[in-house]
Image (cartoon, grey):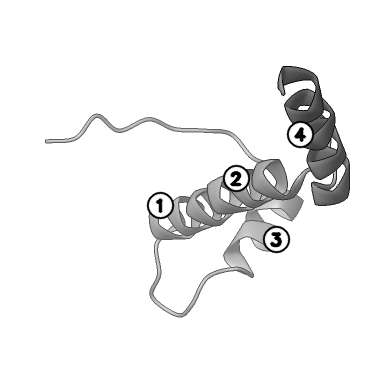
Amino acid sequence: MENITTIQLSKETKDKLASFGAKGESYEDILKRIYSLAVKEQLREFLMSSEGTISIEEARKELDKKWLRSK
């Protein structure tokens, strides 16, 4: 049997959580689905981030400089 725990939520938060569910869906199912979506969104944001990147044009210029020096 799985370990079961209890978390405390305000009524407002519980109602908001329930609004994400379909009829008959448990809070466990709702939370698992929301968690899965959040993980995918974090990955998407990470992959689409331009932080620490350069454009293709900049990369080509850098490569051209390196190749010219090595010839």
Q: Which residue occupies the extreme front position in the image?
A: 71
Q: Is 60 in front, or is 12?
A: 60
Distance in Å between CA atoms under marks 3 and 2:
25 Å
- Where is mark 3, residue-wise? 16
On the rendered structure, is 31 left or right of 19? Answer: left
Task: Looking at the image, tell me whether mark 2 or mark 1 is earlier in sequence order.
Answer: 1
- The image position of residue 71, as x and y in percent, is 72, 23
Distance in Å between CA atoms under marks 4 and 3:
52 Å
Distance in Å between CA atoms under marks 3 and 1:
14 Å
Task: Looking at the image, tell me whether mark 1 or mark 4 is earlier in sequence order.
Answer: 1
Residue 48, relative to residue 20: is it above or below? Answer: above
Please name which of the two marks, 3 or 2, marks the residue nearer to the observer: 2
- Where is mark 2, residue-wise? 43
- The image position of residue 47, as x and y in percent, is 65, 46
Task: Looking at the image, tell me whether mark 3 or mark 2 is earlier in sequence order.
Answer: 3
Task: Looking at the image, tell me whether mark 2 or mark 4 is earlier in sequence order.
Answer: 2
Specify the amino acid type for callout 2.
Leu
Mark 4 crowd level (few <14, some 14–19, many ≥20, 10 Å Cα): few
- Where is mark 1, residue-wise? 28
Specify the amino acid type for callout 3.
Lys
